[in-house]
Image (cartoon, grey):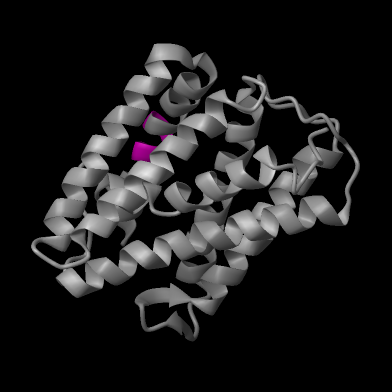
Amino acid sequence: MSQNFFKRLLSSIILLPFSLFVVIKGSLLFNFLLIFCFVISCYEWIMLSQNKSYKLYGFLYFLISFTLIYFLRNNLGNDFNYFLFVILICIFTDLGGYIFGKVIKGPKLTSLSPKKTFSGMIGGFILSQSIIILLFTSNFKIPYLTLKKTTLDIELIIFIFLISSFSQIGDIIISYYKRQANIKDTGKLIPGHGGLLDRLDGIILACPLSYLFLKFEIFTFFK
């Protein structure tokens, strides 16, 4: 477990700054990365689903998800803050789930994903809420990330909770299909993490739904 943890940590140290740079830079660079992720996700889904009857539904899911991810980055006042904000929620949800799940362990969350625990689920909620609220309500600034509101309210808490929930549900969905295929990871592209879908599983559900929330102004805390 220790060796895998350090592989996971090293991969994150390399990939996170590059990914954030691409998100901030936008334009053709972001579009290229998005297309690359879509193609690799589809390939890993082919390997995962084989000739199952649900293979086509997976392709449709990815097509809709990545299209809305593009809109989240480019079609909300051309402001990458929305996208970066949601990605941060997903990252801290995943990190909290990993840390709490490994340290505390405890009862399993669901048979759909046998490695998921209640402690990991709660840890994902705690870390995402704590870090994002801290960033929102303190004077600490993240370069390039402009949060237009600096007061805490129930709308912000609900939004973080929902996006964190969707991120964890997306993780469980892919984990279920991995279990159906009797495989541990969707691929070997990212050392310590597995395949690309192993890292994007929560994001490809949370980002599209967050776009719909923000586009139709169900949540307006950025205003």
Q: Nearer the viewer, residue 93 or 50?
A: 50
In percent of width and height, residue 66 lies at: 40, 39
Question: Which image quadrant: the C terminus?
Answer: top right
Q: Nearer the viewer, residue 201 or 214?
A: 214
* Residue 57, quarter of the rendered image: bottom left
The tally of labels here is 0
Which residue is at 54% across, 28% downward? 73
Residue placed farthest to the left in the image? 51
Q: Nearer the viewer, residue 22 or 59?
A: 59
In percent of width and height, residue 27 lies at: 46, 13
Which residue is at 33% across, 21% downward? 32
Drawn side of residue 31 relative to residue 159, left or right: left
Q: Is residue 125 magenta?
A: no
Drawn side of residue 210 relative to residue 153, left or right: left
Magenta stretch bounds:
10-14
In percent of width and height, residue 211 lies at: 59, 41
In percent of width and height, residue 159 lies at: 71, 53
Q: Is residue 76 above or below residue 1?
A: above
Drawn side of residue 195 relative to residue 25, left or right: left
Camera sees residue 3: no
Question: Which image quadrant: the N terminus?
Answer: bottom left
Which residue is at 40% across, 44% downward? 64
Q: Is residue 20 above or below residue 5?
A: above
Which residue is at 44% across, 60% downward? 170
Q: Is residue 147 above or below residue 108?
A: above
Drawn side of residue 20 relative to residue 212, left or right: left
Camera sees residue 126: yes
Q: Give the prevailing secondary structure in the magenta stretch.
A: helix
* Residue 34, quarter of the rendered image: top left
